[in-house]
């Protein structure tokens, strides 16, 4: 009880409390908020009026006053009134509601088109016009906190279960068109501040659009129960200026209308993307890219030093039969997965798989000495 009262008395406990819908960060969410507010006022006014008249009538005509019931027949005026007034009220609600619904499905003429595919349990983003493609997964620090690695607790992680390694990046004041589908089960792409959610259904493409009017970071999540990893599918959208967006495209190796006029972006992300697209890798390049992939995808379960988490069922890679055995078997397990380990064949390029296999066999206390090549991975797919 003391803890509850302490939390209730803390200003931080009220930080995210609100009495209404969030106004959001797009013209569409503003329109929905205005419609909701107008309907709330109309419905509240009617409810208060009806209850007030009913209460007055009950008090005025109570039995103790000896009031005799009136005897009357139909009233044309009253019948017209209770027909016309509800019609006016419904029209006042229906007209703006219809306008809002039409705007919700206005998916034409987008400035930026993005294809979104839901997977168990991550999001895949593709910018077809810009040539950019990447996966967005739960951030490693949230995964480590969820597993209790090194004593990390959820409360120690900012945005626990609400942060990702690769956020979706879009320009401010641009109309963003989304084509949403799924590769396995039904998911739902939901970022409240950007205007509701849209289901991701296998074999079907659903459309959605938004125009963000404020620069910032907006968070959401999968809103359709999709299996045991459902809670680990956050969504993060970064709305940036046009110049920053074009710089981001350039760093990703994408195409933009003014990308060549922008200063060079930081080298590290561009280097990893370039290495991931290569047909061949030197040993140093493979170890560099492999360490990057391992730390991002594998270390939460197998640990950064390869020691694993035996109590949780995650085996060590140091000295393991997989990491020191036949390289073809190692590649096959990374591509297709095994037991609790997910399949990474659809998430990583041939170069990334070759690199992480090379890294696992020649780091983490292992010194096998061999190397995997992108061509080997391609042949084993």
Image (cartoon, rainbow, N blue to C red):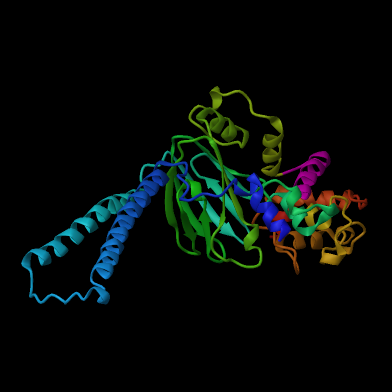
Q: Nearer the viewer, residue 74 or 69?
A: 69
Report the span colored magenta.
280-296
Q: In the visual, does 81 lie left or right of 375?
A: left
Q: Name the residue located 68 percent from the left edge and 52 percent from the top edge.
A: 7
Image location of residue 128, percent across then percent down: 50, 44
**Quadrant (top left/top right/bottom left/bottom right) for the N terminus:** bottom right
Image location of residue 227, percent across then percent down: 62, 68
Q: Name the residue located 46 percent from the left edge and 50 percent from the top edge.
A: 21
Magenta stretch: dominant secondary structure: helix
Q: Nearer the viewer, residue 284 or 9?
A: 9
Q: Is residue 137 visible?
A: no
Q: In the visual, does 62 lie left or right of 145?
A: left
Q: How many marks?
A: 0
Q: Nearer the viewer, residue 149 or 50?
A: 50
86 relative to 130, above or below: below
**Quadrant (top left/top right/bottom left/bottom right) for the C terminus:** bottom right
Q: Is residue 292 magenta?
A: yes
Q: Is residue 381 magenta?
A: no
Image location of residue 209, percent across then percent down: 42, 47
Q: Name the residue located 17 percent from the left edge and 59 percent from the top edge.
A: 85
């Amino acid at each position: 009880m003391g803890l509850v009262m302490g939390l209730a008395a803390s200003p931080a406990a009220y930080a995210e409390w609100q009495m209404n819908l969030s106004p959001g960060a797009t013209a569409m969410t503003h329109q929905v908020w205005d419609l909701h507010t107008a309907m709330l006022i109309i419905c509240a006014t009617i409810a208060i009026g009806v209850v007030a008249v009913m209460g007055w009538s009950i008090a005025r005509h109570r039995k103790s006053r000896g009031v005799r019931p009136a005897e009357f027949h139909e009233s044309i005026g009253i019948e017209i009134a209770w027909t016309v007034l509800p019609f006016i009220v419904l029209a006042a609600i229906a007209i703006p509601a219809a306008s809002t619904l039409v705007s919700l499905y206005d998916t034409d003429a987008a400035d930026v088109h993005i294809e979104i595919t839901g997977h168990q349990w991550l999001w895949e983003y593709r910018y077809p016009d810009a040539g950019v493609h990447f996966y967005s997964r739960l951030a490693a620090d949230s995964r480590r906190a969820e597993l209790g690695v090194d004593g990390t607790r959820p409360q120690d992680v900012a945005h626990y279960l609400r942060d990702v390694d690769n956020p979706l990046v879009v320009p401010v004041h641009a109309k963003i068109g989304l084509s949403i589908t799924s590769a396995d089960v039904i998911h739902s792409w939901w970022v409240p501040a950007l205007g509701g959610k849209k289901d991701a259904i296998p074999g079907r493409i659903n459309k959605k659009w938004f125009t963000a009017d404020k620069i910032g970071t907006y968070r959401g999540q999968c809103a359709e129960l999709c299996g045991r990893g459902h809670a680990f599918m956050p969504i993060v959208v970064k709305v940036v200026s046009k110049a920053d967006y074009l710089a981001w495209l350039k760093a990703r190796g994408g195409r933009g209308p003014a990308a060549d006029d922008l200063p060079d972006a930081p080298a590290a992300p561009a280097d990893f993307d370039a290495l991931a697209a290569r047909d061949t890798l030197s040993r140093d390049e493979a170890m560099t890219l492999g360490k990057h992939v391992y730390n991002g995808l594998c270390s939460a379960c197998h640990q950064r030093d390869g020691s694993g988490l035996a109590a949780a069922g995650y085996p060590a890679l140091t000295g393991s039969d997989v990491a020191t055995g036949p390289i073809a078997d190692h590649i096959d397990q990374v591509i297709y997965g095994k037991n609790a380990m997910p399949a990474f064949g659809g998430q990583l390029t041939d170069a990334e798989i070759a690199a992480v296999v090379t890294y696992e066999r020649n780091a983490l206390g292992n010194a096998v000495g061999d190397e995997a090549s992108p061509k080997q991975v391609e042949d084993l797919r």
